[in-house]
Amino acid sequence: MGEKFLEESDGEIAGALYLTYSHFRNRFLDERGLMDSAPGDDWEWDEALVDAQEMREYVDKTWATRILE
């Protein structure tokens, strides 16, 4: 998927990172049923925040590895 976003952003890494983030953010919120609610409304948002931080760390490491190869 990263290659697709890199292509869509004309090879610009910052653009590809933003497209990746946006895609997965929307998918993450949609799958949890949080698209139409405000952050902090209930415990589901607290749980989602912890999961999102873990995913962000994974994505950061993955992209850093790809960039530095």
Image (spheres, rainbow, N blue to C red):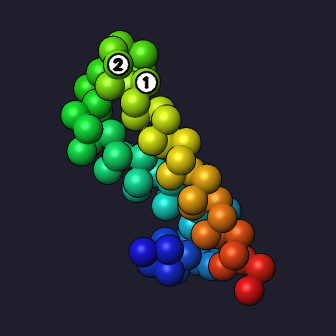
Q: Secondary structure at mark 2?
A: helix
- In the picture as drawn, the residue positioned furthest to the top comes out as 41
Does residue 66 appear in the picture of this structure?
yes
Is residue 47 depicted above or below 10 in this figure?
above
The 10 Å Cα crowd at callout 2, few under 14, some 14 to 19, many 20 or more, is: few
Q: Residue 57: where, in percent of width, then height?
A: 61, 53
Horizontal side, residue 59 vs residue 30: left or right: right
- In the picture as drawn, the residue positioned furthest to the right comes out as 68
- Residue type at the position of mark 2: Trp
Q: Which residue is located at x 35 percent, y 13 percent? A: 41
Q: Secondary structure at mark 1?
A: helix
Q: Residue 32: where, in percent of width, then height?
A: 26, 38
Residue 18 image-quadrant placement: bottom right
Point out the image quarter for the N terminus.
Answer: bottom left
Q: Which residue is located at x 66 percent, y 64 percent? A: 61
Does residue 8 appear in the picture of this structure?
no
Q: Which residue is located at x 34 percent, y 46 percent? A: 28
Horizontal side, residue 66 vs residue 45: left or right: right
What residue is pinned by disc 2?
Answer: 43
Distance Cα–Cα, label 2 vs label 1:
5 Å
- Residue type at the position of mark 1: Asp
What residue is pinned by disc 1?
Answer: 46
